[in-house]
Image (cartoon, rainbow, N blue to C red):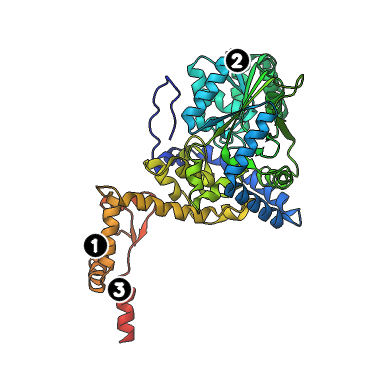
Amino acid sequence: MTAAPPGGPVPPPMPKFAAAARPALADTGLRRNLRRATAALRERAAAASAEPADWEELREAGRAIGDDALRNLDVHLEELERAVTEAGGTVHWAADAAEARRVVAGLVREAGAAEVVAASSLALREIGAAGALAAMGVTVRETAVADLAARLGGDEASHPLSAAAHRDRAQIHELFRRAMPAAGPDLPGDPEALAAAARAHLREPFLRARVAITGANFLVAESGTAVVVESEGNARMCLTLPETLICVAGIDKVVPAWDDMEVFLQLLPRASTGDRMTPYVSTWTGVTRGDGPSAFHLVLLDNGRTRALADEVGRAALRCIRCSACLNVCPVYERTGGRPYGPVHPGPIGAILTPQLLGVESAAAASLPYASTLCGACADVCPVKIDIPEVLVHLRGTVVESRRRRPVPTPEMVLMRGLAWTMGDPRRHEAALRRGTRWARLLSRGGRIRRLPGLLGRWTEARDLPAPPAESFRAWWNGTRA
């Protein structure tokens, strides 16, 4: 699930979700930090979304705009390309992550830059831009405080809004104190001092950078405008100071018209951080002589989105505006963090988006639709009304169907076929119940089965199983009715 940069080592394949989650489940500090972070965001978002009297109408409008944009995506993309070109920008089309990396690397090489500044972006993470540039000797400076903390700690991002959500303030303070000598050994640990230290650390890279790379929250088709929403101002610095601006964005970021931004700029801040307004909303249209970058490049990324668009149920995931509200209410994410979902899209939205972008051929991607309790909390808070549980169940069916086509069935498939054969006949079913009950009671201790044999042992790895009663319901019913 992780792409290797050109010339770099091939990374090991991601393990299944359950295996990848075990280290996080055993890390009490990580779980404590995640619980605090998600609880705070959850409470703020709940309070903010309860304020507008028309919140449900806004959600419905967001859903309708997203659906319209996806139904007519080809038309809107052509309009976007035309508008960007007319404004002096250049549009590059990338069918997959590898092609996007080549485009970005080529543009940086053409600009002659040995260093670039980057604003936090899931799209840049998706294509592996930092690794590709590092392989060609280009230094990438992360400019968001949380991304900077994650890089200094050698971590993978754990949350789209705050890459270092798995670390507490004391840990971030220690990272900054060691990595930023200019801040001094007596650097205070309060948020204001840490933010000021990060600004001072990044000031020189900002001033000398010739190239900046960003993502985009939205792309307005009618005007060719990239919209970047943030809370720190670092992305705005990337948009304005360097000579060359490279924006990488998925084709699903397109909205038809400027009027649509009225809806999304109300939904996004309230659902994500619990703010009435986003502190920084930066917009960029092409190039303007004497104002900002002299070259603007928009890299439009497919990378599986067209395949997701063809799925009538699964395409709802492409409506996502990356608010992270679903992560903050998910009981699974709260206990595991983002790493088990893969390097790009964590949480419930990652569980439905990653398998569609990558396919379900790999064991890791196929396991993601099962990384959910199906409690439905994610659908309740989604500002654009993505029914994530519905898509999860749909993708589970896709996983099962893909396994049916294998020449050698999986052990799970063999077991399920055996169960289907047994339960397809009343006599076979009753005989299996009698024998299964007898063996299960022999395995129990104190009324609980702590370890089942063979493949069934997967069930008891993390839970005990109650021993079955001596008399089954069917036997009791037949005896009572007689």
The residue located at (69%, 40%) in the rendering is: 222
**In which quadrant is the C terminus drawn?**
bottom left
**Disc number placed over residue 111 in the picture, else none:** 2
Which residue corresponds to mark 3? 471
Kind of residue indicated by mark 1: Trp
The residue located at (70%, 53%) in the rendering is: 58
Residue 282 position in % (x across, y down): 72, 32
Dot in front, 2 or 1: 2
Tell me which numbered mark, 2 or 1, is placed earlier along the sequence: 2
Query: Can residue 105 be seen from the camera position used here?
Result: yes
Q: CA distance from mark 1 to mark 3?
A: 14 Å
> 291 and 365: which one is in front?
291
* Left or right position of 310 against 326: left
Residue 31 position in % (x across, y down): 53, 41
Q: CA distance from mark 3 to mark 2?
A: 78 Å
Q: CA distance from mark 2 to mark 1?
A: 72 Å
> 204 and 301: which one is in front?
301
Alpha-carbon neighbours of circle 1 within 10 Å: few (<14), some, or many (≥20)? few
From this view, report whether residue 450 is shown above or below residue 244.
below
Residue 123 position in % (x across, y down): 56, 33
Kind of residue indicated by mark 3: Glu
> 472 and 56: which one is in front?
56
* Left or right position of 191 against 345: right
**Disc number placed over residue 439 in the picture, else none:** 1
Query: Can residue 452 be seen from the camera position used here?
Result: no
The residue located at (24%, 62%) in the rendering is: 439
* Left or right position of 188 against 418: right
